């Protein structure tokens, strides 16, 4: 099936690549279907593209590349929601935010609310890590250097 | 707004399958136990709104030049 996308025009997506988000995402509760599109220039990043609204696409990356000690605990309700059977089928992503064009600023990512996807069942959700101390705007590259971060904390 | 008085151990039911139980009340804080279907998410309001605002901002960033994105070391 063909889908209009925010960054690549119309693309063909096989039905088995559609990821169901039964709860949507905060602010986008009615959007229940997404698919992943690789970023051609940089394979550390990918787009999470809404299947129903072309303009809605989130830039994702793998948080563990930047912060190996990042901890995500998937509560029972979300394990049921994603129909988790094998832990190795779970992938964790964070939504990246870039500084506006022409403006200085850091690239940040939302470590408070990672996107968790079960690649086995193609179901996903955005997890809110309440009480974790993680921020919605963690500097992506500062995190990598481990600056301003207490060891073992967070 | 509907206002109901409840004591610790008592609960309210919303619709058929959402239950909010008052577990304890101590030092000006109320502990609530919430039972809801897995399709419903339950969050502290301020945390949810922070994430919602960040999601909206992340989508609104418009066209971005990804060729200049740094790579993790």
Image (cartoon, coloured by chain):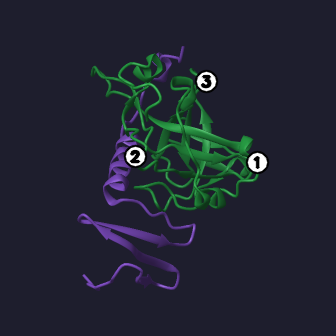
Q: Mark 1 lies on which chain?
A: A
**Contact (Cβ within 8 Å) of mark 1 with mark 3:** no
Residue situated in front as seen by the camera: A86 or A18: A86
A111 or A45: nearer the viewer: A111
Chain A shade: green
Location of mark 3 (residue): A43
On screen, A128 above or below A95? Answer: below
Considering the numbered disc 3 on the image, is that residue within a helix, a strand or a loop?
loop
Chain appearing in purple on the rendered image: B
Whole-percent x and y of residue A85?
A: 76, 53
Secondary element type, mark 2: helix
* Real-space Cα separation, disc 3 to disc 2, in angstroms: 22 Å
Cα–Cα span, label 1 and label 3: 25 Å
Q: Which residue is drawn at 45% across and 38% down?
A: A111
Q: In which quarter of the image is residue A26?
A: bottom left
Picture layout, residue A66 above or below residue A47: above
Q: Residue at x 35, y 22 (%)?
A: A148
Question: Residue A12 location, x and y as percent?
Answer: 68, 43
In the image, what residue occupies the spot 32% across and 83% down?
B6
List x then y, in percent, for residue A117: 63, 46
Q: Residues within 10 Å of mark 3 (few under 14, many from 20)?
A: few
Residue identified by numbered label 1: A86
């Amino acid at each position: 099936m063909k889908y209009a996308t925010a960054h690549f025009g119309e693309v063909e997506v096989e039905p088995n690549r559609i990821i169901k988000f039964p709860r949507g995402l905060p602010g986008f509760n009615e959007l229940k279907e997404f698919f992943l599109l690789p970023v051609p220039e940089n394979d550390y990043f990918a787009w999470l593209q809404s299947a129903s609204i072309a303009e809605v696409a989130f830039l994702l990356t793998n948080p563990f590349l930047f912060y190996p000690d990042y901890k995500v605990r998937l509560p029972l309700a979300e394990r049921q929601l994603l129909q988790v059977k094998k832990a190795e089928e779970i992938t964790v992503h964070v939504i990246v935010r870039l500084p506006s064009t022409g403006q200085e600023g850091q690239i940040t990512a939302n470590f408070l609310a990672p996107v968790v996807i079960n690649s086995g069942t193609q179901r996903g959700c955005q997890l809110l890590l309440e009480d974790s101390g993680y921020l919605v705007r963690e500097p992506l590259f500062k995190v990598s250097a481990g600056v301003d971060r207490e060891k073992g904390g967070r | 707004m509907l206002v109901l008085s409840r004591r610790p151990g008592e609960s309210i039911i919303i619709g058929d399958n959402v239950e909010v139980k008052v577990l304890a009340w101590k030092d000006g804080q109320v502990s609530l136990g919430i039972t809801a279907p897995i399709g419903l998410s339950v969050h502290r309001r301020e945390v949810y709104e922070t994430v919602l605002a960040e999601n909206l901002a992340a989508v609104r960033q418009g066209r971005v030049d990804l060729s200049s994105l740094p790579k993790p070391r």
